[in-house]
Image (cartoon, helix red, strand yellow):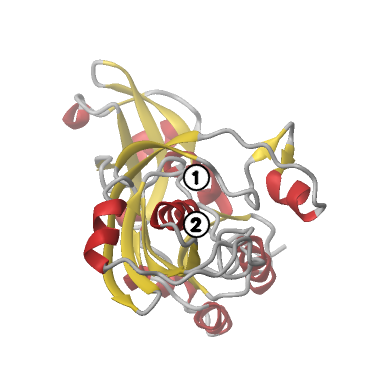
Amino acid sequence: MTQSTNGVLIIDKPAGLTSHDVVHRVRRIVGQRSVGHLGTLDPMATGVLPLVLGNMTRIAQFYLKSEKSYEGVIRFGFATDTYDAEGEAASTPQELTLSLGRLRQMSAKFHGIIEQMPPPFSAKKIQGVPAYKLARKKKDVVLQPVQVEIKEFELLTLDDSQASFRALVASGTYVRSIAHDLGQLAGCGAHLQSLRRTSVAEFTLEDAHTLEDFDGAVKSGELESILVHPRKLLPNMPGVTATDENLTRIRHGQAVNLPELSRAREVKVFYGQRELIAIATRVAGTLFHSKIVLA
């Protein structure tokens, strides 16, 4: 049996693949089943797709509410049934007559905590069934608005009917819905023409590698060089290096004293420079107990 590869890998997802397609390819390249991702990207979208391999799948719980940043293009003139360029036209084409300044005024509505209607072609579940499966069968999709947080949404340029933008949003926000709703406000319809995710939590495009890069690194035995250094993970959580004695106690599920981190609620515990062995939670005073053990 081959040894499991443990780590965090950031893939620059190409257009045309689902997030699961990327996971499947990475599983095949690395030769193990234990691979997951930290946040779905639509097939048409590109950019940052963090993957967790081996025992690092256990840290996914700490990224469930990660904020994400995007850049992309909204095309005004007609809406689509999927709210993006892959769908069918859902409104009569109309010319955009508004200026960039006027569109910016309208886009101010998409800031802060707002109620947002998810797209009918989305993974939101209706009585346990993803909405997109119902939509593909031409069944009625009755979704409820959800509360989301848009930390930044800025229109940058307007070229004919296409506006470039950048956005910073909390987890669960649909950028497709922002494009669709802005088109409704503009009175001419709109949809998401293109989308590129530039960051998820602490991971950015600078950390990202192509699937081809990953394949080459595995074949050349240099996989560790493109994995995220464990010390860079969860930067808002303090880290401590375990002694040999603490290492044994942690691996046996026993509580340990970490006096220098007595004020922290959760801490990362390392052994040596690279090995993240646990996430520990403070029990009382300076006593910590492992929430998850990774080694």
Dot 2 falls on a residue whose secondary structure is helix
| Left or right: residue 18 compared with residue 191 | right
Instruction: Identify which residue, 47 or 184, lies in the foreground.
Output: 184
Which residue is label 1 attached to?
60
Sequence-first disc among 1 and 2:
1
In which quadrant of the rendered view does residue 265 lie? top left
Query: Taking the image as drawn, is residue 294 in sight?
Result: no
Q: Residues within 10 Å of mark 2 (few under 14, many from 20)?
A: many
Q: Position of residue 47 (x, y in %)?
A: 45, 69
Q: In the image, what residue type sits under mark 2?
A: Arg
Q: Is residue 11 above or below residue 210?
A: above
Q: CA distance from mark 1 to mark 2?
A: 25 Å
Q: Give percent across and percent down for residue 159.
A: 33, 79
Q: Which residue matches tag 2? A: 176
Percent position (x, y) of residue 26?
62, 69
Q: Position of residue 127 (x, y in %)?
A: 74, 31
Name the residue at 53% across, 43% down.
58
Foreground: 185 or 179? 185
Can you tell which quarter of the image residue 80 is in?
Answer: bottom right
- Residue at 59% from the left image edge and 65% from the top image edge: 92
**Residue 250, quarter of the rendered image:** top left
Q: Which residue sits furthest right?
A: 137
Q: Residue at x 62, y 74 (%)?
A: 16
